[in-house]
Image (cartoon, rainbow, N blue to C red):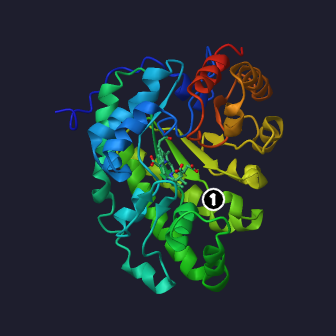
Amino acid sequence: MELTNKNFPELKNDRLLRAAAGKEVDKVPVWVMRQAGRYLPEFQAVRAKHDFFTVCRTPELACEVTLQPLRRYPHLDASIIFSDILVIPQALGMTVEMHPGLGPVFPSPLKDPSEIDQLQPEGAVSRLTYVGDAITLTRHKIEGKVPLIGFTGAPFTLMGYMIEGGGSKTMSKTKEWIEKYPKDVHKLLKLLTNVIIDYLIMQVESGAQLLQVFESSADHLTREQFIEFSAPYLKDIRIGVRKAIEEKSLDQVPMTVFAKGGGHSLDIQAHLGYETIGIDWTVDPIQARKAVGENITLQGNLDPQDLYKKPEEIRKMTIEMARKFGKHRYICNLGHGITPQTPLESMTAFTESIHEAF
Ligand code: CP3
């Protein structure tokens, strides 16, 4: 049966894993955050029939949409399992709905710290086995064409959604918690960290070949707040995953941290134990390299809005960007997720041109 058989097809394109490990590559690997998404008509067709979280929870559907961008864009060097960071709050007992045009909505967000004790961390990962099943199924169906990336939200980002009840421009409630209840905030971040570690290990056991941690709300934090509320937990996650993989005698898996808006603390991120650091477009590649040193791979960072330019312009910008990063220790990506109205030919220009850059 495909969900129990972990004897996966041999990997034919290891550029992503080589770049993450600091090995030489023939061409710079490329993938795109949210590459399975609404800009693809074939994704829209699946979503017309199925609710967002139904797609996440049904391994056959999650696998299908994970494979969609690879079929259309043969230059992609990686796939990322289709899911969402908010499946963790769901597994902890919270209700999360995806409202078209609005994004994620929590009908009952955390109102005050006394509600932390109502969360159910015990058995949370066993309620996420559908993600593992989707990963295992996809590893078979992908036939070793490219590696499969697993992912999670980072503790601070998840906490923000759980307190705000959805996306927030200001994070005002979360900041109030930080101000009024710092101890409870740390208790919640620790709870999330422990669940995240077990969740990532489960993804590795299921077949994930690289793991990315999304600290998407780092843009709300000062450097000092990042040091207090994000960095220690990101580090614990990296250490915890490495240790468990070792204890289980599995092969080690490289990890990427992507702190959107975290350009203020790249030097700190460089000491968290991650092989790769993702950067958004507000950070200059040359400055980023100076901040993190030579022993870390950088990932990024074209502005997703640049994909609205003409294909020729996109090619030029991609090549210019790549020359700043250099061929070594570099994974080409956008600086954040691709947006729904992106023209299909923009992705062709982006993914093709990077392979011509060096
Ligand atoms: O291809 C891939 O990248 C894999 C799939 C993926 C999704 N979400 C699917 C998705 C990944 C890696 C995520 C991560 C995620 N989810 C993050 C971190 C990355 C980031 O963007 O900063 C965050 C913050 C979320 C939470 C979330 N999910 C938001 C804020 C939204 C609404 C924004 C939007 O684009 O509509 C989602 C919805 C979502 N997650 C969609 C997809 C394809 C679109 C919803 C739909 O199909 O109706």
The answer to whether residue 208 is visible is: no
Q: Would residue 177 be found to the left or right of residue 191 on screen?
A: right
> Which is more toward the observer, 356 or 278?
356
Q: Would residue 202 be found to the left or right of residue 299 on screen?
A: left
Image x and y of residue 20, in percent: 59, 32
Q: Residue at x 45, y 68 (%)?
A: 106
Task: Indicate the quadrant where residue 304 lies.
Answer: top right
> Which is more toward the observer, 232 or 221?
221
The answer to whether residue 16 is visible is: yes
Q: Residue at x 64, y 20 (%)?
A: 349
Q: Secondary structure at mark 1?
A: loop
Q: Is mark 1 within 8 Å of ligand 1?
A: yes
* Label 1 environment density (alpha carbons within 10 Å; few <14, some 14–19, many ≥20): many
> Which is more toward the observer, 86 or 244?
86
Amino acid bearing label 1: Ser
Image x and y of residue 105, in percent: 46, 65
Q: How many callouts does the rendering have? A: 1
The answer to whether residue 204 is above or below residue 157 is above
Q: Would residue 143 be found to the left or right of residue 110 on screen?
A: left
Image x and y of residue 159, in percent: 53, 68
Image x and y of residue 340, in percent: 55, 40
- Please state, as top left, top right, bottom left or bottom right, where the C terminus lies in the image: top right
Q: Residue at x 57, y 43 (%)?
A: 256
**Label 1 sits on residue:** 217
